[in-house]
Amino acid sequence: MTSAAVALVLANLAYWIAGIGALLALGFVDAGTSTWSRIPAAYLFGVVIVVVPSSYLALLGVAVGWTAISVAIVVLFAIGLVRLRRAEPGSPPRRRARRVSDLFAGALAVLLIGLAGFVLVRAWQTFIVTPLYVSDAWVVWAARARLLYELPADAPGILRGTNYGPPSYPLAMPELEALTFRAIGRFDGTLIDLQLLALVFGLLGAMWSLSRGRARTWLVALVALAMLTAPQFVVQLGTSFVDIPLAVFVGSALLAGARWLSRADEDRWSLTCFVAFAGMAGLLKNEGTMFALAAVVSLLICARWTSGRSIRDAVVSAAGVAVMVVPWRLYGAAYRLPTADYDLKDVFNPIYLADHAERVGPVLSELLSELSDPSRWGLLLPVVVLGLVAGVLSSRWTTGLFAVLWIVLAFVGLVMTYWVSVLPLTNDLFNSSYRTTASLVLGTACLVPMLVDDAITLTANRVTRGVSGVSARLRPSR
């Protein structure tokens, strides 16, 4: 067990190194500037650039091994180091005098980060000995991963059948788990939990990097702590379902999109992260495609209030997400992979929708109940509401609009999914709503630090102007 856990850690370090190499190769990290703060987000970026191509090669019966991944990492670093040497050193970040308030905020951030780390360490100690105990985690995800690991050449044909769960489910998560098995040299269902937990560490790194310069660190740490201590977070993660990993990439994509909308990066780093993370979300689960589509539509709408170049960039990013996701949809259409739960054409069939309109009331009631249940999400619910209100009322209202648009579109998409489902509500809605709403809560929560920080800045500026105005009126005239 110890050697396998070490191998798993090394595999995830390789994802991080691959992400760093990709950022260097793309010119998103250079010498002498603050771009090195982007490195914590490189882990999730590395997972995407390794897993997405591997999952598509798996459809051809090709198993990507760690030798090939290592060669790719070397190539990325070679390209990145050449670019780094040719690039002119950027200006060093400006230093400002430390105030008492800054020191207090820093100490608070360190305390909150320490508490979040304690929660993750305790989860690690539990997950390292927890076997697969939920049926779907084994039947739908782990069994597919084992097939990709042990019989990669035969896996595509077998997975087009129904013996390994719905064949319409994308292969990104099974391929990530299969890569883990290749790293440790055997199938080990217990360590799947640790692989999923590693994605949570990646989320925290992405939150810090993507919020850097847009939100106070203590706000990021506070929201992260509220996430990790939410009753449902660790519980759902421990089931080895894909809903929390999906929320990880959905939240990271939303944060990258919001960062770009608040102030577009000249090198388009945040927009590239948006494409990578949204595309990965679309390849994790079927509803992930719907969440990614909602994010793309929200970004396109909000980009309308920015410069013309930003609109073009948003359109290019939408095309990038499509390039990642559409090939899987074309593959499914070519092989006519059946979807057990619903037929997507029914979404555009008014007669079918009218005949099943009685499902809408229970669906709305159940989803809203899950989203507002404090026993599910604890303090995270008021934090999310506060963030949405603060974002809409702040000076950077485009970011708040982006958050509101996404959650509305994503919620409507979930309602439509259950509306057109052919499964009875008792088996479909009431047994899955607590999981499908996780991306709504956690995805929006990732935006809270930026939304609240904007409101704090706006309030502080108004107070400062008010005090200055009062002082000017009280100052005796000469």
Image: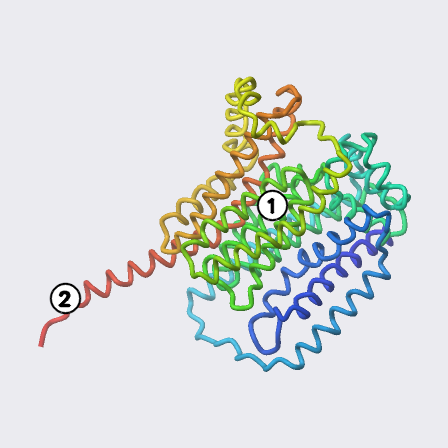
Q: Which residue is mark 2?
A: 474
Q: Is residue 357 above or below residue 218?
A: above
Residue under the image location 75 percent in, 74 percent down: 78
Q: Residues within 10 Å of mark 1 (few under 14, many from 20)?
A: many
Q: Residues within 10 Å of mark 2 (few under 14, many from 20)?
A: few
Percent from the top left, x then y, of residue 290? Answer: 59, 40
Percent from the top left, x then y, of residue 2? Answer: 85, 52
Q: Is residue 53 above or below residue 359?
A: below
Q: Is residue 356 above or below residue 289?
A: above
Circle 1 — which element? helix
CA–CA distance in space, label 1 to label 2 = 50 Å
Percent from the top left, x then y, of residue 466? Answer: 24, 60
Residue 228's tag is: 1
Residue under the image location 36 percent in, 55 percent down: 395
Circle 2 — which element? helix
Q: In the drawing, does residue 272 fall left or right of residue 398? A: right
Earlier along the polypeptide chain: callout 1 or callout 2? 1
* Colour setup of the view: rainbow
Q: Quadrant of residue 286?
A: top right
Q: Is residue 211 above or below residue 425?
A: below
- Amino acid residing under circle 1: Leu
